[in-house]
């Protein structure tokens, strides 16, 4: 399973760094390619030479190693990897990662990466139990970082308790799980995103405030897990993500056609803020001001794309996820909306102006399914996307 997988292994300066040597050996036995990165402190515990010999690779050591930067900058280093593993991860490195600090090669590539990250914490039990470390751990988990260990045991410092780095074989198992449970390779997923524009005449239209940020982040997160994503987007403020199939549309009617054309799919996520109404009397010529009075706009109801796909019977994606943008009675309205539309999950959010969610960077959602309502803390739209993508992967693959 790890054959030809490229693991970027960051070794930080903890007493458990010596176990990283065994980890490298175990990974290579399984066919993985290991590129090691050592922090300065790690070099106090293991030598670059022994790491390099075991990894069969150059060891990357310092941000300002200009030769390395010329050969392969820190961004490229993380791009080339399938997974980044930090073992051992010291309290200091966890704090830096949680805060987004980047003052050496290891922390910089961790900040610059869009790849999955797995950490194996290792520290004194009191440092592990400290509120700051536990807070950092929560932040990292929310950011989508996977964690293995630490385990309970006698520590080098003479104390006993949690803080001991997971054993190399446990870390190998956690690495394998990353390639197994998370992967959406071979799965096709439709994502709708952005607003729709409903023309009044050739120069005017009705629209809404959706930026497309949440749908774009979801499409990106699903693609990062290996899914083949068909991204049907209305005229959004931001560019579509890379690595997805983009279908640009203007109106709800076009969005419905593009969504149907994207089927069959294993899952569909309807993040678009589709206009509920279009003009029944849209003009194909520009409407001119007349002395006689004001134009009368007549509305017609748009097709409900989510409901149409949810209720299509044969050919329906296995998992259909809708969104519910509400300003009042969020959970009740969203729960009713899920049943009315027939989707499997509804991601409910409060879009009242005071929340700053519509058009903002953050979101606070509750995921409603047959299993009940799961409230997620307020987090960035990227974090919501990654967590939702992982939940979709777990549901499709049974992870
Ligand atoms: N949706 C859709 N097609 C529409 C309207 C909505 O596919 N014509 C989808 C959205 O993409 C979202 C979900 O339905 O996943 C709910 O959208 P929302 O605007 O909250 O609900 P509405 O159906 O518009 O209901 P209401 O305006 O009454 O709250």
Image: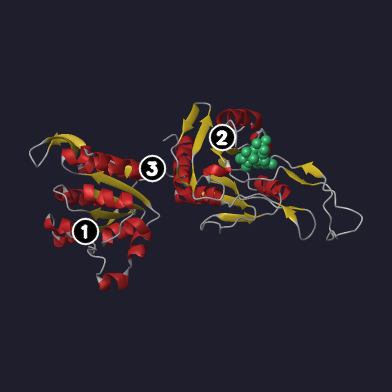
Pointer 2 with pointer 3, Cβ within 8 A: no
Which residue extends farthest top? 371
> At which x and y percent is residue 50?
14, 59
Q: Residues within 10 Å of mark 1 (few under 14, many from 20)?
A: many
Mark 3, residue position: 142
> At which x and y percent is residue 118?
31, 47
Would residue 383 appear left or right of 150 to someone viewing this image? Answer: right
> At which x and y percent is residue 23?
21, 48
- 291 to 23, vertically: above or below: below
> Residue 38: which numbered mark, if any?
1
How far, Cα to Cα, is label 2 from label 3? Answer: 20 Å
Dot 2 or dot 3, earlier in sequence: 3
Q: Quadrant of the image for the C terminus?
A: top left
Which residue extends farthest right? 292
Secondary element type, mark 3? helix
Q: Depth check: give the residue in front, 45 or 373.
A: 373
Would residue 239 appear left or right of 159 to someone viewing this image? Answer: right
Examine the image and state in which quarter residue 308 appears.
top right
> Residue 346: which numbered mark, if any?
2
Secondary element type, mark 2? strand
User: Where ligand 1 lies, by quadrant?
Assistant: top right
Q: Depth check: give the residue in front, 77 or 323.
A: 323
Q: Kindly report which numbered mark, 2 or 1, lies closer to the viewer in this rendering.
A: 2
Assess mark 1: CB under 8 A from ligand 1? no
């Amino acid at each position: 399973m790890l054959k030809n997988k490229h693991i970027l292994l960051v070794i930080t300066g903890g007493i458990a760094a010596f176990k990283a040597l065994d980890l490298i050996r175990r990974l290579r036995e399984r066919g993985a390619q290991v590129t090691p990165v050592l922090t300065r402190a790690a070099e106090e515990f293991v030598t670059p030479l022994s790491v390099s010999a075991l990894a069969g690779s150059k060891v990357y050591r310092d941000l300002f190693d200009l030769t390395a930067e010329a050969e392969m900058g820190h961004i490229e280093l993380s791009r080339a990897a399938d997974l980044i593993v930090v073992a051992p991860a010291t309290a200091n490195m966890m704090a830096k990662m949680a805060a987004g600090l980047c003052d050496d090669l290891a922390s910089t590539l961790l900040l610059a990466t869009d790849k999955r990250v797995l950490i194996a914490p290792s520290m004194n039990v009191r440092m592990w139990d400290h509120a700051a470390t536990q807070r950092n751990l929560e932040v990292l988990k929310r950011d989508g970082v996977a964690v293995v260990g630490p385990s309970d045991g006698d520590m080098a410092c003479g104390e006993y308790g949690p803080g001991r780095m997971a054993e190399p074989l446990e870390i190998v198992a956690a690495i394998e799980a990353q390639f197994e449970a998370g992967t959406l390779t071979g799965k096709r997923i439709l994502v709708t995103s952005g607003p729709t524009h409903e023309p009044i005449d050739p120069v005017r239209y009705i629209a809404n405030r959706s930026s497309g940020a949440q749908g774009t982040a979801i499409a990106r997160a699903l693609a990062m897990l290996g899914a083949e994503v068909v991204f049907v987007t209305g005229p959004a403020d931001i560019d579509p993500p890379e690595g997805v199939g983009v279908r640009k549309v203007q109106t709800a009617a076009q969005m419905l056609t593009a969504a149907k054309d994207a089927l069959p799919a294993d899952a569909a996520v309807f993040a678009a803020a589709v206009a509920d109404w279009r003009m029944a009397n849209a003009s194909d010529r520009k409407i001119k001001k007349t002395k006689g009075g004001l134009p009368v706009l007549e509305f017609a109801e748009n097709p409900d794309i989510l409901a149409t796909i949810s209720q299509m019977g044969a050919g329906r994606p296995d998992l259909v996820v809708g969104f519910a943008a509400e300003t009042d009675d969020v959970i009740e309205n969203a729960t009713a909306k899920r049943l009315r539309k027939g989707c499997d999950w509804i991601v409910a959010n409060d879009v009242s102006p005071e929340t700053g969610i519509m058009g903002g960077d953050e979101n606070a959602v509750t995921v409603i399914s047959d299993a009940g309502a799961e409230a997620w803390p307020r987090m960035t739209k990227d974090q919501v996307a990654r967590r939702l993508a992982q939940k979709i992967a777990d549901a499709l693959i049974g992870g």
